[in-house]
Image (spheres, helix red, strand yellow):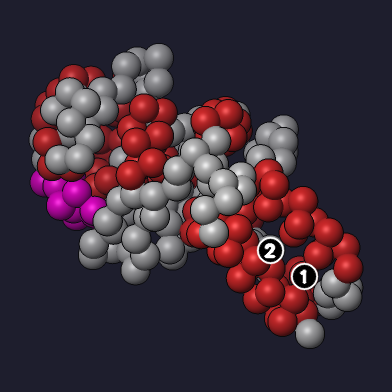
């Protein structure tokens, strides 16, 4: 019965996105919340099994107690692939501390995910997630603490493009074997301006206000060990 209710909710959400009626994520949430209220109680054991164990999350993805709950649009459109807390899953990368202009481009245009991940990032128009909802998502993702280790920093700022193992990821540009000076130059200077569609030619620049010099050295040490 519970599985049937969940499937019905998913079908309803997809229909709301595809019927051309311009339903926003917030509108869809009203229907979902009402359906959940009407559904039978889920076994406590099943409910607990659905929650990720914090001990199993990577360093960058450890939940922060002071961060509030995710926006409605995140729960409906993002959490299934990127995790309830933006920590990532087998279907999508960790997305905390996003580069906003590029992240917005990805949301609006979609993104192929060859190699490391089995899914493709779909494009979501303003009728599915509004600019205001997108800003709320980015604000929430920025509220998480900065990772304190090289592994965590790499997962947070690098793995989304170069892969969790540093061997190319979705852009096909490996980090393994790069010199420390090369990493410093590309992190600080970026690459390709704002040429977002040409993934091998674009990399955002990260200033010391985002990744400090000490944190950059932690990333370099992590990459050296891959």
Residue 157 visible within the image: no
Left or right, 183 with respect to 33, comes to: left
Q: Tell me the quarter of the picture where residue 187 sits.
A: top left
Whether the magenta-drawn stretch holds residue 129 is answered as no
Identify the mark at residue 51; answer none if there is no mark.
2
Are circles 1 and 2 on residues that touch, CB within 8 Å? yes
Q: Nearer the viewer, residue 32 or 15?
A: 15
Q: Which residue: 81% across, 65% down?
A: 35
Q: Which residue: 45% across, 43% down?
A: 125
Q: Position of residue 150 (x, y in %)?
A: 37, 38
Please rate how many residues cluster around mark 1, counting C-alpha atoms within 10 Å: few if below 14, some from 14 to 19, many from 20: few
Q: Tell me the quarter of the picture where residue 11 sits.
A: bottom right
Q: Which residue: 41% across, 28% down?
A: 100
State which region is magenta: 166-177
Q: Position of residue 178 (x, y in %)?
A: 11, 40
Q: Tell me the quarter of the picture where residue 216 sits.
A: top left
Query: Mark 1 and mark 2: span between their CA atoms?
Result: 7 Å
Judge whether 8 appears above or below 106 on screen.
below
Which residue is disc 1 drawn over? 47
Q: Quadrant of the N terminus?
A: bottom right
Whether the magenta-drawn stretch holds residue 168 is answered as yes
Q: Secondary structure at mark 1?
A: helix
Residue 192 visible within the image: yes
Q: Nearer the viewer, residue 59 or 41?
A: 41
Q: Nearer the viewer, residue 83 or 222?
A: 83
Judge whether 158 appears above or below 88 on screen.
above
Q: Secondary structure at mark 2?
A: loop
Q: Nearer the viewer, residue 184 or 80?
A: 80
Left or right, 135 with respect to 51, comes to: left
Q: Position of residue 48 (x, y in %)?
A: 76, 69
């Amino acid at each position: 019965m519970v599985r049937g209710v969940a499937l019905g909710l998913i079908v309803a959400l997809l229909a709301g996105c595809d019927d051309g009626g311009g339903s926003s994520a917030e509108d869809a949430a009203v229907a979902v919340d009402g359906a959940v209220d009407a559904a039978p109680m889920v076994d406590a054991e099943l409910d607990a099994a659905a929650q990720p164990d914090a001990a199993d999350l990577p360093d960058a993805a450890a939940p922060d107690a002071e961060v509030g709950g995710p926006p409605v649009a995140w729960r409906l459109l993002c959490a299934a692939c990127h995790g309830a807390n933006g920590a990532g899953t087998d279907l999508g990368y960790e997305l905390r501390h996003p580069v906003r202009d590029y992240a917005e481009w990805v949301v609006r245009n979609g993104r192929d995910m060859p190699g490391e991940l089995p899914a493709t990032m779909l494009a979501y128009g303003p009728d599915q997630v509004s600019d205001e909802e997108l800003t709320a998502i980015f604000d929430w993702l920025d509220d998480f603490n900065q990772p304190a280790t090289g592994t965590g920093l790499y997962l947070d700022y690098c793995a989304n493009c170069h892969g969790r193992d540093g061997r190319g990821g979705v852009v096909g540009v490996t980090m393994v074997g790069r010199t420390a000076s090369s990493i410093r130059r590309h992190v600080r200077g970026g690459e390709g301006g704002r040429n977002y569609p040409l993934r091998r030619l674009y990399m955002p620049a990260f200033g010391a206000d985002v990744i400090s010099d000490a944190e950059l050295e932690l990333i370099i040490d992590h990459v050296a060990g891959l």
